[in-house]
Image (tube, rainbow, N blue to C red):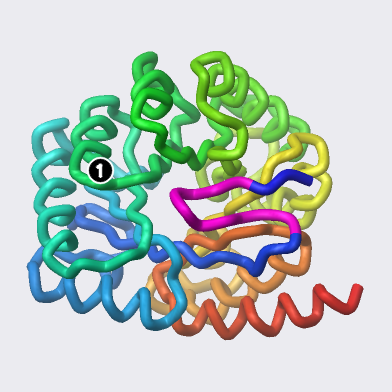
């Protein structure tokens, strides 16, 4: 299994599980508790996330929850991201900054401002995205993407979807050791399986998916709807315990990085899971 770098953060075989703090700049986000729209709030959230164990700060200017109407214009998304990058720059932090976006203009302007990682949940759907990431020497969180209509094999679909996007990334010249994969928990909702079963199957088969793809893997399970279905908690603010369970299981099953809204709590769950994993 390979090792990759998200900026200067080493992820993969032999490394401790890395935590990525999800900070949403979009009021449309499904978890209101993750939204930051004021400067003091942002500074506090960034600094606390780092002190609690996050190696990477992931900023999102447009929510991508597939079951909500969250579309905003490119200019709105860009304004949100650039505002946050300017505010963070004044903090003089050394942590890596990731930008959660599908749009090439947002990518390029963010990389100019000092971001070092692009988190593209669309699997490089924007035709200019891969070249921009390559030209700036950025790292890439590459998600499985595609239409799962009629699909009954989540693991096989995720492997094929990631491989298709990987081909685009590698053909564009993005260095393999700057890529990690993400199976896109929560994004496939039209398969033959209920979405919560799809997500559960993927998490249960993380090690198999990693082995077939050959790259380190990140998962984002924090507060997501499959947890709400299992625990009967419709309100994302009540899904912390389920999120920690899903994160710990993901680590036991071989994941290399966790994207979370709750860094302090997730850090403890991950530490226990890593310890247990080390005894296998």
Q: Which residue is drawn at 9% across and 33% down?
A: 75
**Image mark count:** 1
Residue 181 horizontal/vertical position (percent): 60, 42
Q: Residue under circle 1?
A: 70
Q: Is residue 91 visible?
A: yes
Q: Give the range drawn in magenta.
A: 4-13
Residue 149 horizontal/vertical position (percent): 61, 26
Q: Residue at x 58, y 21 (%)?
A: 170
Q: Quadrant of the C terminus?
A: bottom right
Q: Residue at x 48, y 61 (%)?
A: 259
Instruction: Indicate the quadrant where residue 214 lies.
Output: top right
Q: Is residue 153 visible?
A: no
Q: Is residue 187 magenta?
A: no
Main secondary-structure element of the magenta-colored stretch: strand
Q: In this view, does 202 lie to the left or right of 247?
A: right
How crowded pointer 1 is (Cα within 10 Å; few <14, some 14-19, many 20+) is rated as: some
Residue 108 horizontal/vertical position (percent): 25, 30
Examine the rendered structure and indicate whether residue 247 appears above or below residue 104. Answer: below
197 or 110, nearer to the observer: 110
Q: Is residue 6 magenta?
A: yes
Examine the rendered structure and indicate whether residue 190 appears above or below residue 256. Answer: above
């Amino acid at each position: 299994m390979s090792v990759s770098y998200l900026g200067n953060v080493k992820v993969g075989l032999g490394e401790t599980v890395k935590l990525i703090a999800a900070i949403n700049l979009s009021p449309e986000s499904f978890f209101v508790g993750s939204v930051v729209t004021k400067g003091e709030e942002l500074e506090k959230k960034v600094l606390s996330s780092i002190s609690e164990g996050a190696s990477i700060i992931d900023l999102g200017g447009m929510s991508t929850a597939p079951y909500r109407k969250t579309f905003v214009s490119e200019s709105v998304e860009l304004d949100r991201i650039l505002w946050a990058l300017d505010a963070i720059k004044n903090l003089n932090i050394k942590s890596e900054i990731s930008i959660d976006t599908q749009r090439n203009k947002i990518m390029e302007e963010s990389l100019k401002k000092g971001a070092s990682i692009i988190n593209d949940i669309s699997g490089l759907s924007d035709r200019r995205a891969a070249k921009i990431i390559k030209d700036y020497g950025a790292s890439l969180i590459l998600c499985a993407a595609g239409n799962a209509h009629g699909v009954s094999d989540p693991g096989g679909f995720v492997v094929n979807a990631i491989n298709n996007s990987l081909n685009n990334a590698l053909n564009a010249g993005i260095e393999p050791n700057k890529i990690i994969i993400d199976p896109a928990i929560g994004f496939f909702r039209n398969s033959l399986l209920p979405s919560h079963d799809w997500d559960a199957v993927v998490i249960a088969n993380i090690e198999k998916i990693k082995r077939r793809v050959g790259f380190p893997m990140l998962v984002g399970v924090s507060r997501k709807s499959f947890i709400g279905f299992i625990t009967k908690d419709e309100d994302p603010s009540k899904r912390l315990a389920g999120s920690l369970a899903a994160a710990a299981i993901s680590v036991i099953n071989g994941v290399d990085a966790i994207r979370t809204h709750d860094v302090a709590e997730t850090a403890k769950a991950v530490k226990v899971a890593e310890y247990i994993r080390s005894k296998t």
